[in-house]
Amino acid sequence: MGRLFGTDGVRGVAGSDLTAGLAMDLAAAAAGVLAGSGAFAQARDAHRRPLAVVGRDPRASGEFLEAAVVAGLAGSGVDVLRLGVIPTPAVAYLTAELGAEFGVMLSASHNPAPDNGIKFFARGGVKLPDAVEDEIEARLAAGHGGDRPAGEPRSAREPRAALAGPAGVPEGGFGRVRDAVGQGERYLDYLLSTVTGPDPSAEPLAGLRVVVDCAHGAAAGFAPALLRRAGADVVTIGVEPDGLNINDGCGSTHLDVLADAVITHGADAGIAHDGDADRCLAVDAAGQVIDGDQILAVLALALRDAGRLDGDTVVATVMSNLGFRLAMRDAGISVVETPVGDRYLVAAMLDGKYMLGGEQSGHIIMLDHATTGDGLLTALHLLAQMARQDRSLAELAAVMTRYPQVLINIPGVDKSLVASSASLSEAVGAAEAELGDAGRVLVRPSGTEPTVRVMVEAVDPEQAQGLAARLAAVVRDLG
């Protein structure tokens, strides 16, 4: 099989690409790497079993996949704290806060309900580097003996290879499983403290009316409560998850619903999350979309003005809008560029000791508060800037002019051909020559979906649309 891990964990259609057998085997392989040996295990107390925290979003398939992951971990000698339905960034936070060896999140983020995924966090709540993911995949393959497809059940006599001792029994015994109590509240308390400081009774969002769209996802039980505790008057949509309606016509991929609600309720702003709440997008009082680039620009300027933007540098991906780059240049802020994916942002931020990074899709990382993108944290700090500066969201976002950007997703194409196609390379070169310094072209395979993305940015929207359509046709011809 090809590489199992994508841009953000292992993802696929639940029950088909992502089976219970694969989930259990993958969990056991991860236990062997993250808790059994090597650098991640060196800090572990030898007198206790390793601990993993496991969370999920509300999609129906998360129930059986959670059971499979927990079985794989406990069967490998790992104690499991089951967090239940909870945002992805809460799993990262609690992995660090509880001193767990690693964390596991079951979610397909903004994808529709039939999809699901498995994400891992290493000790400290950080996403895994490629080398560690490769090690897990190698261990998974070795556990199958090289002759059985991933996810196919092992025979009753075939021992699990993760932490097994004699006769397949894990060293230190089998792991124990328990349900978390109060850990979600602990996460909310922490988020609130990042804007209130030592005074938990402070209400930094007092006077603001906010609509929050939780995408019928993991944010539903957390985001409204957080904003209300911060003093906001909160209107909710997308807060009735039934396991099948996650991201369905709501959330960060359907901002028109949020825009209508903001106007209807006369709100100051609207906040949209995705299924696992690691993203935050917004709309202003007039219903105009405020994307991740604009949010990042607002936060970057606020931190610079407070003298807290390390190196006067912000980290962004190759998808960031040209208008963002120009706004940062005009503000004297440097931009470090990474591939798409918040783990690449984090890696660059850690390497350069920068504290703020993000991407247009709404993953914003504030390393002085979190180890990964956190949609609830982002919303809290964005709204707090409105209150502190006594300015509307539209006024804050006006710091950058968003260049017209056309994005076309082409499904059903062999993504491996993108890098090797001479015809595509020639077409991209011609488009770049036509744009000159007045735009950008980006063609890349998606890391989370079976899709190739074509992005063209230009001052003239018709030119951007025409070039994007021309490049999309070339991509479709790749087959």
Image (cartoon, rainbow, N blue to C red):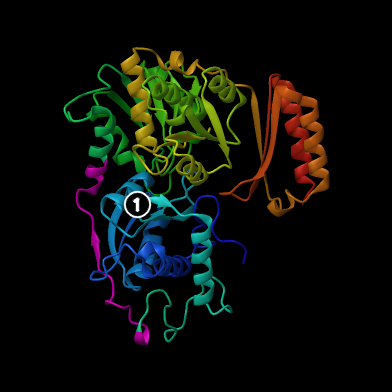
x and y percentages locating residue 40 in the rendered image: 38, 62
Magenta region, residue range = 166-187
Q: Quadrant of residue 27?
A: bottom left
x and y percentages locating residue 28 in the rendered image: 41, 69
Residue shown at the point (42%, 16%) measured from the top left: 285
x and y percentages locating residue 362 in the rendered image: 48, 34
The amino acid type, in three-letter code, at marker 1 is Gly
Number of marks in picture: 1
Q: Quadrant of residue 376?
A: top left
203 and 333: which one is in front? 333
Is 142 in the magenta? no
Above or below residue 121? Residue 149 is: below
Tell me, yes or no, if residue 5 can be seen here. Answer: yes
x and y percentages locating residue 431 in the rendered image: 78, 31
Residue shown at the point (36%, 18%) measured from the top left: 386
140 and 262: which one is in front? 140
Is 167 in the magenta? yes
Is 92 situated left or right of 226 in this image? right
Residue shown at the point (53%, 22%) measured from the top left: 328
